[in-house]
Image (cartoon, grey):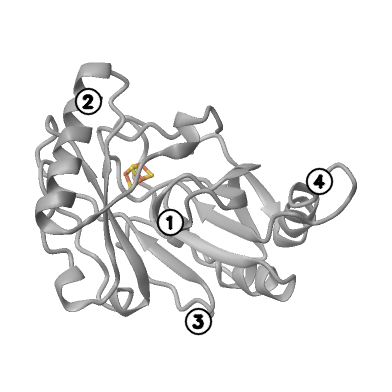
Amino acid sequence: MFGKNLKRKPEKGDGKKLFVQEMFSTLQGECYLAGVPAVFVRLGGCNLACKFCDTEFESFKEISVEKIIEKTEKLAKNKRGKRVKNLVVITGGEPFRQPIEYLCKQLIKAKFKVQIETNGTIFRDLPKAVEVVCSPKAKAKIHGDLLPRINAFKFIISKNFDGYKNIWDAGQSASSAPVYIQPMDEYNARKNKANLECCKKLALEEGYYLSLQTHKIIGLD
Ligand code: SF4
């Protein structure tokens, strides 16, 4: 978090157990599924250490996929026991760092739509139904095999961080996937306003789609 985390290498194995930071139900706040009720599975560890990263992902526990599915089913239900959330967002840390193929297959088998949020630097051959949102990180190359699997690019914009003042070609020019821009949250009202203004300008002048962290705006995790 804030660039202080260990840069962890990709994990090997059959993926029957994974390192999980937390699981919770919320609304997906960002990008093209913003507003959709979802169960979030936050996996532990990341292969990068971005200075602006505001996510805690280093106090994870190893949990079996069966237990993850069980908890997902529980979180997806309302108080009357009816499933009301059909989307599972796997995020991190960096979710592709772990062998998540088995988890994705089991979630699809349980009739969940699966969306992965990734920095795009690691590739795993996931089921075709899995949707991928790639948030490129400055100076980090997107894995060539992942590019055709990306459903949307989401660039984080900041007036203060080098590499985030504008967007660069991370592979989106050769892709038909939409490009979103999202103001970085720097926990400073003046800086956040400047980042939002920058995004508004880029959206209007370049045609990028604006993504806001709506979960934060409405006070959800
Ligand atoms: S890639 Fe994402 S999760 Fe990893 S350190 Fe950067 S912002 Fe945080």
Report the residue at 28% width, 66% height from top: 178
Q: Mark 2 points at which residue?
A: 193
Sequence order check, earlier mark of 2 and 1:
1
Disc 4 or disc 1, which is closer to the eye? 4
Q: Name the residue under label 1.
A: 117
Q: Do the residues labelled 3 and 1 touch (CB within 8 Å)?
A: no
**Disc 4 and disc 2: Cα gap in Å?**
36 Å
**Disc 2 and disc 1: Cα gap in Å?**
25 Å
- Looking at the rendered structure, the kind of residue marked 1 is Glu
**Disc 4 and disc 1: Cα gap in Å?**
25 Å
Sequence order check, earlier mark of 3 and 2:
3
| Res 196 label | none
Sequence order check, earlier mark of 4 and 2:
4
User: Residue 55 in the image: x percent, y percent?
Assistant: 43, 35
Q: In which quarter of the image is ligand 1?
A: top left
Report the residue at 38% width, 55% height from top: 9
Q: Do the residues labelled 4 and 1 touch (CB within 8 Å)?
A: no
Which quadrant holds the C terminus? top right
Q: Nearer the viewer, residue 10 or 42?
A: 42
Tag 1, which secondary structure?
strand
Q: Mark 4 points at which residue?
A: 78
User: Residue 33 in the image: x percent, y percent?
Assistant: 48, 57
Report the residue at 10% width, 41% height from top: 165
Q: Name the residue under label 3.
A: 128
Residues packed near mark 4 inside 10 Å, few (<14), some (14 to 19) or many (20 plus)? few
User: Residue 112 in the image: x percent, y percent?
Assistant: 67, 67
Q: Are marks 4 and 3 in contact (CB under 8 Å)?
A: no
